[in-house]
Structure formats: C-alpha cells, structure tokens
Amino acid sequence: MKKIELLAPAGNLEILKVAIQAGANAVYLAGKNFGARSFSQNFTNDEMIEAVHYAHLRNAKVYITVNTIVYNEEFNELKEYIHFLYTINVDALIIQDLGVLRWIRMTYPDFEIHASTQMNIYDQNGALQLKNSGVKRVVLARETPLYIAQEIVKTGIEVEIFIHGALCFCASGNCLMSFAIGKRSGNRGKCAQPCRKKYILLEDGKQVTKASALLSMKDLNTISNMDEIIDSGVSSLKIEGRMKSKEYVYAVVKSYREIIDQYYQTKKIVVDPIMNERLLVTFNRGFTKGYLFQEKNRLITNINRVNHQGIVIGKVIHGTRNFIEIKLTKDLSLKDAIRITGVNEIGFVVNKMFINGMDVKIAKASDIVKLFVQNSVKIGAIVVKTKDSQIEREVISLLNQENVKEKIVAKLTIHYMEKPILELIKDDVKVVVMGKIIAEFSNKPMHTDFFCERLNKTKDTPFIFQKVIVDYDNQAYLSIKELNELRRNALEQLSKRINCNIKRENIPYYENPNTPTVSKNSTIEAIVHNKEQYAVCKELGIDVIYTDFESQLKNKNRLMNDLNEGLVQNLGNVSKNSIISSYFNVVNHEAVLFLMGKGANKVYLSNELEINQLKEFRDIAKRIDLGIMVYGKMDLMITKHCFISKAKGHMEKKCQECINHEYQLVDEYNNKMDVFPNPYEDCSLRILDSNTRDWYCYIEQLKKFNIKKFLFVFTIESREQVKKIIKKYQKAL
C-alpha cells in the first residue's frame, strides 16, 4: 500500500534540509518571483538546483509554488522561469493562475501540475475540470470538509489537504482586502494580513464590540484525527508555514511523521503530551480542527491574540522590582524564551535562574524558580513559554548529521589482471564504475568482510549499503586508496543519475472551444441587491441584470448573498456559454483562452487590474466579450465563518440575527466596510470595500481597448442613486 505523502514548507535551504531529515516526503518552496509568500526568504536559482539535488538523493520530492496571478507583461519572464524549473528536474509546479496552467500544459505536456488552494476547488465538478485540463493533483480549498474530500478522491485526481498551520479567513485565500487597502495583493504574494488587524463591529450604526481581531483564525491542528484523514484516501498532507522558523518546521514534521508511522504500524493514534507541547511551543494562535472537521463556529477564531500564544508553564507567586518567583507547572531550561502576560507584557530569553539560591540549568514542574527582571510584574501573572531551547538543540543536531539514508545494493568484482568493477543499484537506477587493471598479486588474500567494511564508510553521503556482494578471486591486491576512490566515484555517479531520474508522463489537456458571438456595441450590465435597484435598472433599459434576491429575500428588501444567477464564480460550474465572474481573477490572455476552451461566452476581468493594463486585452477582446466592473464596491472577501454570531454571543451559526440589522466592520483608519450575510443557507459573509469604484473618466479608454461590457455592482445604493449613476454612464456611451 502506497503511504500518504507528508508535505512540508521550506522558506530557505536550511529549512528544506530540516524538513527532509525530520521525515517529510516532499517539500514545497518558491523562487524569488511568482510565489504567494514574497516576504519569505525564498530560493535563488542556484539554491533551487541544490535543493532539488539534495531532496532527490533522499527520495523526497520538490514542488515549486508558481501560485500568483501573472500579468500579461510578466509572461516572458515567467516562460524563462518555467523552462529553468523544467530543466533542473523539479517534480511539480503549484499553480493558481488559469492562464499559467494553460500555457504550461501546451508547452510542457509532461510537467506535473498541482492546482493551488487559491483555485477554490471544493467539489467533484471543479476537480474534474482540472483533471481534464491536465492537472495531476488538486489542493482543496481549506473550507472543504473531509467527507467532501473523500468524494473528490473518487474522481481519480490526487487530493492534497492542509493539516496544520495558519488558516485564511477568506474562502480559499482568494482575498482582495490587502489589495484594496494598501495595494498589496494577496494573490500576488504580498498579503499584509488584514485579517490579523483589529476591527469594530457596528450594528445599525452602533458599536457592539470593542476593537479586536474579529477576523483572526486559530491555527489548524488535525494530528489527533490522522486516522480518519489517512483512511479518507487523500494523497498528500500539507503543512502550512513557508514563513515559519526551522524549529517550527522540525517540530511539526517530526510530530506528524511519528503519528503517521504509528498509524500504519498499529492502526491506532496516540498523541502523547510531549508531542502536543512540541506543537504548542513552536507556534500556535490556539488550535482548531477547522472546516476539515466542521469545527463549531465559536471555536474557530481567536480574536484576542494574533501572534504566537505559547504554552502556559506557571504563574508568578512573588516578586519585587528586580526579580520574580514562578511556580512551574512545566519544565523550564536556560535559553528558553518566556512571556509574562498582563497589561504590559514582557518577554525575554532565560539566561539565569535559581532554585533555593542555587544557579541551575533546568527547573522541573512544581519547582519554584527565581528569575531576574527589569520590569515590575504583578503577582498572579501567567507565564508562557514561547521558545524551547531543547527543540533548537535538536535542530542543530539534525543539521550536523545525516539521518535520512537511502538503501542501495553493491556488487564488487576484484580479479587479478582485470579492472575492478563496482556496481551500485538503487531502485531502477544502476551505475557501473571501473578502476585501473589490478597488476599487483596478493601474497595474503584479503577477506571479503574487509571490502564490505570499507564500502560502508558512507558517513557524509545519504546512502547506506543494504547488501554488498563481493566477487573476489583471492589473488588480486586492491589498495584502500583505490577502493575508496572506486566507492567515491560510484556514489557520485549514482547521485547524478538519481537526480536526473525523474519520471515524467504526458498528461493530456482537453479543450472544447466555444466560438462566442462578440458584441458590436458597448453595453451596461448590473448586479442588484434589492427590488428597487432591479426596477430602476429595468426602467432605464439595462441589457443584463444579475440577481438572486427573489429566492433569498424573505423579511427584508435586501439581497443576502452573491449567488448571481448567470454569473459563474467557481470552476466546477463553467460550461458552454458561461459568463465568467471577476472572482476568477483573470489577468492575462492565456486565462481568457483557458475559459474560452471550457465554453465561456463572456469574461469579466479581475478587479485587481489597473486601467493601463487593460490595453493589453485589446486584441483578444475581438474574439470574446470582455468586461470590467466600472462602478461598485469590490468584494474584499467571502468567508464561511460568521463573526457576527460570535461577536453577539451566539454559540453557533443560523441564529439569523442579521436578518433585522445592518452590519459594518470599522478598521483602525475608520474605514467602514459593509457586511452582507447569508443567514438562510450556510451563514457565509461578504465583506465589501469601504470605497466605491467609479471609472466614469475611463470610459473612452475602455472602449478603445475593445472592452464591451461595463458592470455596475449595486449594494447599498438608493433608488435615486442608482438612477443618477446609470444615466451618467448612459450619456457617456
């Protein structure tokens, strides 16, 4: 039975080595460009070459994240980069952009592609679309429950799920909040993490919460459910954390490696306290099982702390201006980092500590330990450990030794007046090296154990001899120097062969091109959210109106969600004559061609595009109707978590509190973002931009770019405002 893959993040080369030595089967990393964590250290080209070589020699795979949206003007650079990755034998690429996917499939049909979680795949239809597009594996949206993942496995595509680490508040991480607020696009790898900021919730204009991190998710931790996950049939288990420390990667990989191996051996899961503490102390914002196990609404966020929470190790029982005494509940060692909670938190590395006046290096649980401090601390303050020096020492030790050894078979032939031959075999890779003719006769035959012992001196390599076969005629004399050289040359050749031995297979890419009818004239289309807006649009002759308020509106004259009839927002729903929503983040020609190949009849381009970038679509707009939102508030994020119910003190979803009230989020700059809930189905929320886009001044430019469809998105506008806006644009057209 093929074991499940444990996939670890690698922010740099050192962390990659730690991850593999700790037990990861594969690592994912990024170059300096086109990766969704641009603030991570990331890899130079030379470092990637070394990374691939290092991993392949240890039977680990390397996946490169090319998971940003890519503008037209960047494609030449992208093409060179993809070619480089192909030539250095990267195992697979992780892709978000549909255009990048299409170009790679057309250019490198045997380059393995994994669909990023930002493609928002959470059902069988979406998975099948990608499978037919030549995708080998899909990384499911993080809000996908495990039982749905099991259904997607049945499509035959490999399924990868997140099992540990940070969670995005926005569905699948497809978030425009950072872009809208500070022009730092999360889809371009520059997320400013607005979900970790403090917000105030307004209800009907009145403040109902204090400023707190209403959008901050706890960290995912599924280690106690590893049996269910393995049995689900998914192919890969992904750990989040390309911006995390080597200690974090080591602790998480080691813990999950132990649990996975334990389950395969015993069919049981036992998470011991040491393992839990290891995970808590390296990084946690509080833990949740997340959407994967449909965690209760009240348990999925931590609105009080957005950074590392640490692990409680004791309480301050006595103190003065210069020192404190702590009653420990867990061990404390020199070089551990601690934080003492309170109004004015203090944190420091423990360099000195005393028990009964004695200088000690380790203090045990139940000990009373004395520490010197520079700030006053209140009696009763909680003490947490934020860094464990023992884990740091283990990481250093790991980097100084080769834990991971690949088993090989050797056959050594030594005959008088013939060339010595050393043959090495690893799986299906075989190398043969020869030395110089042995002209020296041995007066004292050498024992075969001697040859075996010398060959097994592979300390500085990732290999260990599983079996050594010696064919010796008892006559030839082979010096230790010659034998060592033979071993060294053979291992070097084996290393090179293994690195080049990546198996690629052509994966077919299917298109079913639609030939859409291209409009001759520019037209206005609208999304409306209530009956009044709809009536005005009809009255003023708007060509196409998207709405679903008739099915959702019950007690209020307002639309409760964004399931706009006719507008496709998910890849699984794309079919012949589909109208593609801007939610797809189409920012290049190739993405348009991809969607045309799936039958699209009209494509709304991404709201992340600036006006000067739209001119690049002038030619392709002659083949298909392209549109852009010219008026309205952008969706900053769509979330499956209802922070309203939690803020209002309701234990679970479906409280329907939002039916009778209007809600807004207020940030630190007093920007007010409208919140549109859907209380009748899954209690999802939409957060809208505080600013309203109005591109009236760009109409003539857009017409020159052959943009034919101008989209209005009406949300909170009154009847009079809708009428005024439409008439203004109609006059321009």
Image (tube, rainbow, N blue to C red):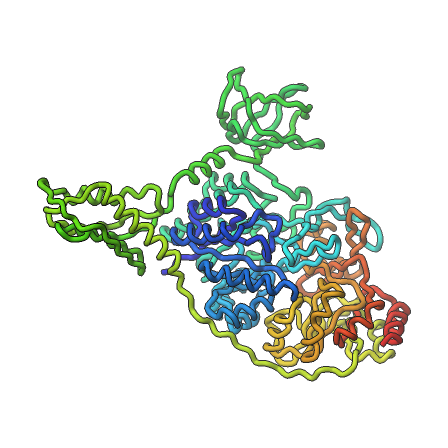
Location of residue 628 by image quarter = bottom right
Q: In the picture shown, does residue 373 fall above or below 144?
A: above
Location of residue 527 by image quarter = bottom right
- Residue closest to the eye, 185 or 547: 185
Q: Position of residue 629 (x, y in %)?
A: 76, 68
Q: Is residue 34 left or right of residue 48?
A: right
Q: Tell me, yes or no, if residue 464 can be seen here.
A: yes
- Residue closest to the eye, 461 or 11: 461
Q: Is residue 199 left or right of residue 167?
A: right
Q: Identify the residue at horizontal 56%, vertical 45% (top origin).
A: 244
Q: Position of residue 500 (x, y in %)?
A: 39, 59
Q: In the picture shown, does residue 676 fall above or below 257?
A: below
- Residue closest to the eye, 555 or 102: 102
Q: Quadrant of the C terminus?
A: bottom right
Location of residue 595 by image quarter = bottom right
Q: In the picture shown, does residue 725 fall above or below 381?
A: below
- Residue closest to the eye, 115 or 88: 88
Q: Quadrant of the N terminus?
A: bottom left
Q: Is residue 214 left or right of residue 101?
A: right
